[in-house]
Amino acid sequence: MLQLDGGRAMHRLTDKLEELGYSWAYRIVDTRAFGLPQRRRRVLLLASATEDPRGPLLTQDLGVPAPPEVDGTPCGFYWTEGERGLGLAVDAVPTLKGGSSIGIPSPPAIWIPGEGAFTPDIRDAERLQGFPRDWTAAADAPGRRSGTRWKLVGNAVSVPVAAWIGGRLRNDHEYVASADTELGAGARWPDAAWGDLSVRCAAPVSAWPVREPALPLLTFLEYPLKPLSARATSGFLLRADRGSLRFPDGFKSDLREHERHMVRIS
């Protein structure tokens, strides 16, 4: 959102809000902060003509924790990509999405070092968004496409993120802007900012307003993983070999062995 159309999309949005008499504030918030092993960074934007939107959105911040080590740790990645992006998430899945670079709603993959690549069950994907298992089961009606539930999950807002901002809106929070810096005319949009007709400033807050306890990814998942198919693995490796992305040690060799294994058993 912040990079869309070279940042111009966000300018059009905030310009219009100010034209209508609103002050605004936004912040990237990561679902991992709420104890769910999904790296999902999303822009939350508040605007008001009467209240200070900075208070509920920007006054709580616990900072990004130290990242886990990649060595030996399961990592989520986008098997539908590989040439220009990977989405590698250590001990988490990358953002669940309603679509993909190959045009279909699909689960991310999980690389388990030394074992291969797998995809999570849709019921665990629902849980990764904070929903109860089978929250989207009604979409399994006859005639619906098999990817409908994945699209619903991928397009949703993480439940604890929505609950957090809803709770913040219920109470007053005074914002102190002493550490903020004014945004210049050509500045890139930072991870958090606020503005009105008189000024626009960057706010030094992280994507982690809270730090809820989190289980390791494989402990969190409750349902059996499905091995990534030989065809999907082959397509990913083909794209990965064409591109110039860097991969963790053992990643591509594990996937090549996984591909050979899936071909043998099929």
Image: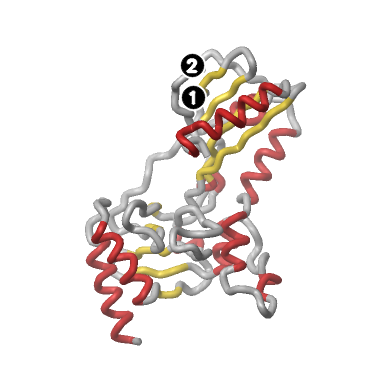
Report the side of 261 relative to 147 (left or right).
Answer: left
Q: Residues at badges 2 and 1 in contact (C-beta under 8 Å)?
A: yes
Q: Is residue 257 above or below residue 212?
A: below
Position of residue 260 measured from the top left corner of the image (x, y, whole percent):
26, 78
Does any portion of residue 138 appear in the rendered image?
A: yes
Label 1: few (<14), some or many (≥20) within 10 Å? some
In the foreground, 145 or 125: 145
**Looking at numbered disc 1 in the image, what kind of residue is underneath it?**
Pro
Position of residue 165 measured from the top left corner of the image (x, y, whole percent):
66, 38
Q: Distance between the Cα atoms at labels 2 and 1?
A: 9 Å
**Looking at numbered disc 2 in the image, what kind of residue is underneath it?**
Thr
Position of residue 191 measured from the top left corner of the image (x, y, whole percent):
49, 32
Q: Could you say which disc has been placed on residue 265 in the image?
A: none
Position of residue 147 measured from the top left corner of the image (x, y, whole percent):
57, 69
Rendering quarter of residue 150: bottom right
Does any portion of residue 55 appear in the rendered image?
A: no
Q: Who's the residue at 38% across and 59% down the image? A: 81
Q: Could you say which disc has been placed on residue 181 in the image?
A: 2
Dot 1: what SS?
loop
- Quarter of the picture holding the C terminus: bottom left
Q: Is residue 157 above or below residue 200?
A: below
Mark 2 or mark 1: which comes first in sequence?
A: 2
Dot 2: what SS?
strand
Residue bearing mark 1: 204
